[in-house]
Image (cartoon, rainbow, N blue to C red):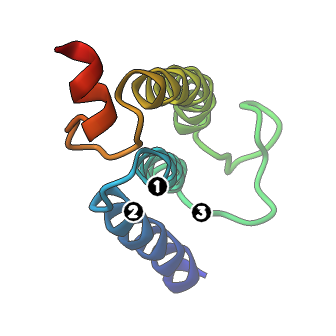
Protein backbone atom coordinates (compact mmCIF):
# COMPACT_ATOMS: atom_id res chain seq x y z
CA UNK A 1 0.00 0.00 0.00
CA UNK A 2 2.86 2.36 0.77
CA UNK A 3 4.33 1.83 -2.69
CA UNK A 4 1.03 2.69 -4.35
CA UNK A 5 0.63 5.77 -2.16
CA UNK A 6 4.17 6.97 -2.82
CA UNK A 7 3.83 6.42 -6.55
CA UNK A 8 0.59 8.43 -6.61
CA UNK A 9 2.35 11.32 -4.86
CA UNK A 10 5.27 11.04 -7.29
CA UNK A 11 3.01 11.02 -10.36
CA UNK A 12 1.10 14.06 -9.09
CA UNK A 13 4.33 15.98 -8.47
CA UNK A 14 5.73 14.99 -11.86
CA UNK A 15 2.60 16.05 -13.71
CA UNK A 16 2.42 19.26 -11.68
CA UNK A 17 6.01 20.23 -12.48
CA UNK A 18 5.47 19.42 -16.16
CA UNK A 19 2.40 21.67 -16.25
CA UNK A 20 4.21 24.43 -14.34
CA UNK A 21 6.86 24.54 -17.05
CA UNK A 22 4.29 25.27 -19.76
CA UNK A 23 4.05 28.81 -21.11
CA UNK A 24 0.28 29.23 -20.65
CA UNK A 25 -1.63 30.30 -17.56
CA UNK A 26 -4.24 27.53 -17.38
CA UNK A 27 -1.68 24.67 -17.34
CA UNK A 28 0.25 26.58 -14.67
CA UNK A 29 -2.88 26.78 -12.52
CA UNK A 30 -3.50 23.05 -13.01
CA UNK A 31 0.13 22.31 -12.14
CA UNK A 32 -0.10 24.28 -8.90
CA UNK A 33 -3.30 22.45 -8.04
CA UNK A 34 -1.72 19.04 -8.69
CA UNK A 35 1.29 19.89 -6.54
CA UNK A 36 -1.00 21.04 -3.73
CA UNK A 37 -2.86 17.71 -3.96
CA UNK A 38 0.45 15.86 -3.77
CA UNK A 39 1.44 17.85 -0.68
CA UNK A 40 -1.93 17.07 0.90
CA UNK A 41 -1.43 13.35 0.29
CA UNK A 42 2.08 13.56 1.72
CA UNK A 43 0.84 15.35 4.84
CA UNK A 44 -1.94 12.81 5.25
CA UNK A 45 0.53 9.93 5.05
CA UNK A 46 2.60 11.43 7.85
CA UNK A 47 -0.17 10.36 10.24
CA UNK A 48 0.73 6.71 9.59
CA UNK A 49 -1.20 4.69 7.07
CA UNK A 50 -3.20 2.27 9.20
CA UNK A 51 -6.22 0.17 8.40
CA UNK A 52 -9.05 -0.60 10.87
CA UNK A 53 -7.79 1.78 13.55
CA UNK A 54 -9.85 4.21 15.60
CA UNK A 55 -10.00 7.78 14.36
CA UNK A 56 -10.89 9.32 17.71
CA UNK A 57 -8.72 9.13 20.82
CA UNK A 58 -9.97 6.93 23.61
CA UNK A 59 -11.98 4.44 21.54
CA UNK A 60 -9.16 1.97 21.01
CA UNK A 61 -5.58 1.17 21.89
CA UNK A 62 -4.27 2.14 18.44
CA UNK A 63 -5.49 5.30 16.76
CA UNK A 64 -4.75 7.45 13.76
CA UNK A 65 -3.00 10.75 14.38
CA UNK A 66 -5.57 13.58 14.02
CA UNK A 67 -3.06 16.39 13.46
CA UNK A 68 -2.22 15.53 9.81
CA UNK A 69 -5.93 15.21 9.11
CA UNK A 70 -6.53 18.72 10.46
CA UNK A 71 -3.57 20.07 8.48
CA UNK A 72 -4.87 18.51 5.26
CA UNK A 73 -8.36 19.90 5.84
CA UNK A 74 -6.90 23.38 6.35
CA UNK A 75 -4.65 23.00 3.30
CA UNK A 76 -7.63 22.01 1.13
CA UNK A 77 -9.52 25.17 2.10
CA UNK A 78 -6.49 27.42 1.58
CA UNK A 79 -5.65 25.68 -1.71
CA UNK A 80 -9.18 26.23 -3.01
CA UNK A 81 -9.02 29.94 -2.14
CA UNK A 82 -5.60 30.36 -3.75
CA UNK A 83 -6.71 28.51 -6.88
CA UNK A 84 -9.70 30.83 -7.22
CA UNK A 85 -7.40 33.84 -6.76
CA UNK A 86 -4.90 32.61 -9.37
CA UNK A 87 -7.70 31.88 -11.85
CA UNK A 88 -8.99 35.45 -11.44
CA UNK A 89 -5.45 36.77 -11.92
CA UNK A 90 -5.03 34.71 -15.08
CA UNK A 91 -8.36 35.93 -16.47
CA UNK A 92 -7.31 39.51 -15.76
CA UNK A 93 -3.92 38.95 -17.37
CA UNK A 94 -5.58 37.48 -20.45
CA UNK A 95 -7.89 40.48 -20.68
CA UNK A 96 -5.09 43.01 -20.24
CA UNK A 97 -2.42 41.39 -22.41
CA UNK A 98 -4.57 39.76 -25.07
CA UNK A 99 -2.93 36.34 -24.68
CA UNK A 100 -2.38 33.83 -21.94
CA UNK A 101 1.40 33.45 -22.07
CA UNK A 102 3.12 33.47 -18.73
CA UNK A 103 6.05 35.62 -19.89
CA UNK A 104 3.78 38.69 -20.10
CA UNK A 105 4.76 39.94 -23.54
CA UNK A 106 2.25 42.16 -25.28
CA UNK A 107 0.75 41.28 -28.62
CA UNK A 108 1.18 43.63 -31.58
CA UNK A 109 -2.33 45.01 -31.34
CA UNK A 110 -1.91 45.85 -27.65
CA UNK A 111 1.44 47.56 -28.36
CA UNK A 112 -0.24 49.76 -30.94
CA UNK A 113 -3.02 50.66 -28.50
CA UNK A 114 -0.55 51.71 -25.82
CA UNK A 115 1.32 54.09 -28.14
- Which structural element holds mark 1? helix
Q: Are marks 1 and 3 in contact (CB under 8 Å)?
A: no
- Locate residue 6, reporting x and y percent: 46, 75
Judge whether 46 appears above or below 88 on screen: below
Reading the image, the residue beneath label 1 is 27
Q: CA distance from mark 1 to mark 3?
A: 32 Å
User: What label does residue 81 carry, if any?
Assistant: none
User: What label does residue 19 carry, if any?
Assistant: 2
Structural crowding at the residue carrying mark 1, measured as other residues with C-alpha within 10 Å and reported as few (<14), some (14–19) or many (≥20): some
Of 5 and 106, nearer the camera is 106
Q: CA distance from mark 3 to mark 2?
A: 29 Å
Q: Earlier in the sequence, mark 1 or mark 2?
A: 2
Marks 1 and 3: which is nearer the front?
A: 1
- Locate residue 20, reporting x and y percent: 33, 56
Q: Earlier in the sequence, mark 1 or mark 3?
A: 1
Q: Are marks 1 and 2 in contact (CB under 8 Å)?
A: yes
Q: Is residue 71 left or right of residue 66?
A: left
Of 103 and 109, nearer the camera is 109
Amino acid sequence: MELLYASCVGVLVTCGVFLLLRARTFPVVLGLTMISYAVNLFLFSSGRLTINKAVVLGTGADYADPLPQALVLTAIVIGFAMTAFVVILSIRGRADLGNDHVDGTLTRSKRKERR
